[in-house]
Amino acid sequence: MTDLKGRTALVTGSVGGLGYALAEALAGAGANVVLNGLADPAEGAAVAEKLAAERGVAAAFDPTDLRDVGAIERMVAGTVERFGSLDVLVNNAVVRHFAPIEAFTAEAWDRSVSVNLSAAFHAVRCALPHMKRAGWGRIVNLSSYYGFRGAQNRVDYVTTKTALIGLTRAIAIECARDGVTANAIMPGSVPTEPILTRIEGIAEERGEPFEDVARAYAEERSPVGRFIAMENIGALLVFLCGPAAADITGTVMPIDGGWLAA
């Protein structure tokens, strides 16, 4: 029910962290994968080669800066030219800044909106004609728990993750009869590098062991008392891209250990 053999997926922000876990899950289901990120081209190519070798699929790396609309257009076109199709688009790339609104710089705001939201729109805009012609497509946007609530000192993240949910719903309605689904995944707290770095800073500031601070951080954000496993988010993504999810569209899928319920 989750066989994606012969499909091609493009995952933004995927040379490491959650993005790579999502790409790995899709490759594990048989999809060819295009990785994207701002890594050194040789480093990115090596990550793609590793994924291809481990999963027995074709993989490539594209270094597109998602603030560049023309580059996004070329990335989508290049994916189709190389693999013959673009069947799955996962908008995962994200940047974030921590500051109160009155101290938030215009540059930081514009960068977050460009990468977190506008890039997703432009990637969808470019991918949809190919999906509609094929009569099949899966678009998945990575929102967040903060797409449903506010938070201090992260206005860019809250705003863009909320807007991604609206974008998802609009795409779903517009493409409802084209064989293309659009859904959003809403992870809770995931042990990504930025989160772990933040925890390290808290631990250093408090003079407490990293393990204790990490455990308390996770417990505050999840009734199950732990971080959300990246491989479980990947499994949800694969399900949404499979045939069993053909009637699921315009939906936000929480995977947060009960954080929203609490």
Image: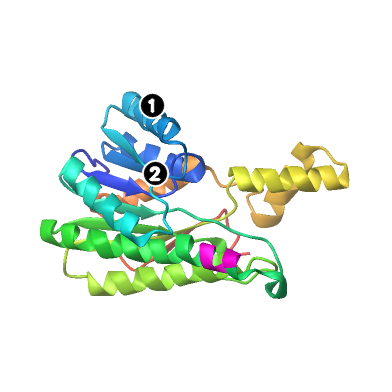
| Residue 57, picture quadrant | top left
Residue 109 horizontal/vertical position (percent): 57, 68
Which of the two residues, 258 or 58, is positioned nearer the viewer here?
A: 58
Residue at x 24%, y 46% (from the top left corner): 79
Q: Quick check: 111 left or right of 259?
A: left
Residue 27 horizontal/vertical position (percent): 32, 36
Q: Is mark 2 on a helix, strand or loop?
A: loop
Q: Mark 1 points at which residue?
A: 50
Q: Is residue 206 part of the magenta span, yes or no?
A: no
Whether residues under marks 2 and 1 lie with C-beta atoms below 8 angstroms apart, the answer is no
Q: Specify the farthest residue to the right.
A: 207
Q: Which of marks 2 and 1 is nearer the N terminus?
A: 1
Q: Main secondary structure of the magenta part?
A: helix
Q: In which quarter of the image is the C terminus?
A: bottom right
Which amino acid, by three-letter code, is at mark 1?
Answer: Lys
> Relative to 174, does residue 23 appear above or below in the rendering?
above
Residue 232 horizontal/vertical position (percent): 46, 44
Marking on residue 63: 2
Which amino acid, by three-letter code, is at mark 2?
Answer: Pro
